[in-house]
Amino acid sequence: MGVAFKDLILGKEISIDDLSGKKIAIDAFNNLYQYITTIRQRDGTPLMDSKGRVTSHLVGLFNRTTKLMQSHIMPAFVFDGKAPDLKAKERERRKSLKIEAEQKYQEAKKKEDEEEMKKYASRTSRLTQDMIDEAKKVIAALGLPIIQAPSEGEAQAAHIAKKGDAFATVSQDFDTLLYGSPKLVRNLSIAGKRKRANSAIYETINPEIIDLTETINGLGIDNNQLIALAMLIGTDYNCQGIKGIGPKNALKLVKKHGSDFDSLFEEVKWQDCYNFPWTDVYYLFKNMPVTDDYNLEWKDPDWEAINKILVDEHEFSQSRVDSAREKLTKNKSAKQQKGLGDFF
């Protein structure tokens, strides 16, 4: 879900090349969901191999990640651990939405309405443990770091960026900002031309970067107030937010009460909306478990392993893998030559 900050927080448009030479911490689950929801056939069904196994996530992961690597970007993938107990309600909400979307998809299928089928099919997307395990194998074969978060991957990614071990976090959601990530990059996994929803019009999606310091200074609040602001709008731990309070009104309320969050949540009648205190959500953001037990080491891709996973196991075309390999090898050679020339 993430936080509905879109109307309040504006990013600066960048190109993929602007991240060249940078280490980035990617929220892996968020990244993979982007692929399984957007990479689909015309009728909305996901890409699959002959055994009926979904491959949309592998197609997106391999294609997009190798393109980042061609631009000399150094991605590390952070995977979720155990979800906080407070997230259970949000998970139930998502589950019910998927069930509803499945029903509407079946209705559209009976009517042979491809647009409606595609619309609702993407909302039924599920990331299974098998898909996660397959993604990890591809990432490891590409020679990229995998970090296992003790809890929320977004918090761990932010922790890595705060320590200076990564330039930025990468996610479509704004949550890493709540965990203190100095910089957030959005749209990296969906950059390019994309068909607008319910329209025949194509639009160009470019990556954008959001600077935390610039953001809170622009809003006139501090990091703690940013968390309170998110709670009024709605987070993964209080998904409904406070009824009747939108982003702009929420910002006014946060500024009005300053650091007195007791009075803020008393005024908005938090206790009438939730059967747990506001502090449970606030301190979850402040104290989300993270770890320093990770290794950021980038290695050369193991093309034999990549072929085994993608070509042999999931029937990718050999030419697709060979093309990516050729481009990466060429780019690496060009970089080494440039470095040698700069030296002399």
Image (cartoon, rainbow, N blue to C red):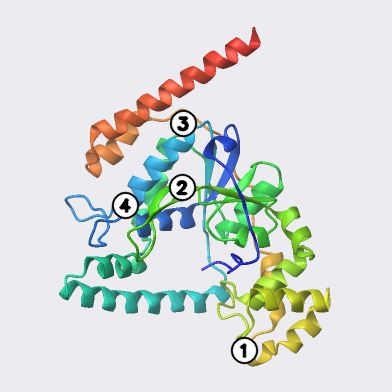
The image shows residue 236, relative to residue 274, as above or below, that is above
Tag on residue 70? 3
Q: Which residue is mark 1?
A: 273
Amino acid beneath label 4: Ser
Q: How many marks?
A: 4
Question: 21 or 160: nearer the eye?
Answer: 21
Give SS at disc 2.
loop
CA gap between label 2 and label 1 equals 38 Å
Mark 3 or mark 1, earlier in chain: 3
Give SS at disc 3.
helix
Nearer to us: label 4 or label 2: 2
Nearer to us: label 2 or label 1: 2
At x 60%, y 61%, the residue is: 174
Amino acid beneath label 3: Gln
The 10 Å Cα crowd at callout 3, few under 14, some 14 to 19, many 20 or more, is many
Give SS at disc 4.
helix
Residue 95: image x %, image y %? 40, 75
